[in-house]
Image: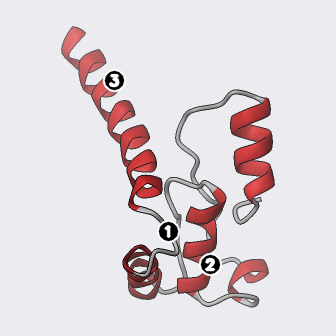
Amino acid sequence: ASLSKYIINDLLRNQMGYDGIVITDAMNMGAISQQYSSSDAAVKAIQAGADIVLMPEDFSSAYLGIINAVKEGVISQERIDESLNRILSVKIKIREAEAEK
């Protein structure tokens, strides 16, 4: 599911209306790490609609894979901004809730 655009975008976001943060399963699990490099898995997860990639087997490779995918136009800056906006929105809500206490 962490690499499935159908599940994240079509089913979860479009059909079910979820607009919150999507976090992948641990990307170092065998089902992913035996099939994909950390870089490829991270890029596929972001392309699928995930906002946060959890526990890649090789963090540096995953990070650079996403950076390079944006530079090469494989992932758009707008796609990255979507995730950033979701994450920042939750952080702002948390801070506001803490300030009300």
Q: Is the residue marked by circle 1 packed among few (<14), some (14-19), or many (20+) residues within 10 Å? A: some
For the residues labelled 2 and 1, say whether their Cβ atoms are less than 8 Å apart: no
The residue singled out by tag 3 in the image is 93
Q: Earlier in the sequence, mark 2 or mark 3?
A: 2
Q: Position of residue 38 (x, y in %)?
A: 56, 85
Find disc 1 in the rendering and name its residue.
75
Residue type at the position of mark 1: Ile
- Of circles 3 and 1, the one toward us is 1
Which comes before the other along the chain, label 2 or label 1? 2
Residue found at the far front of this picture: 73
Horizontal side, residue 36 vs residue 94: left or right = right
Residue flagged by tag 3: what amino acid is it?
A: Lys
Foreground pick, 80 / 51 = 80
Corner quadrant of residue 93: top left
Mark 3–mark 1 distance (CA, rounded to whole Å): 28 Å
Q: Which of marks 3 and 1 is nearer the N terminus?
A: 1
State the residue at coordinates (73%, 34%): 14
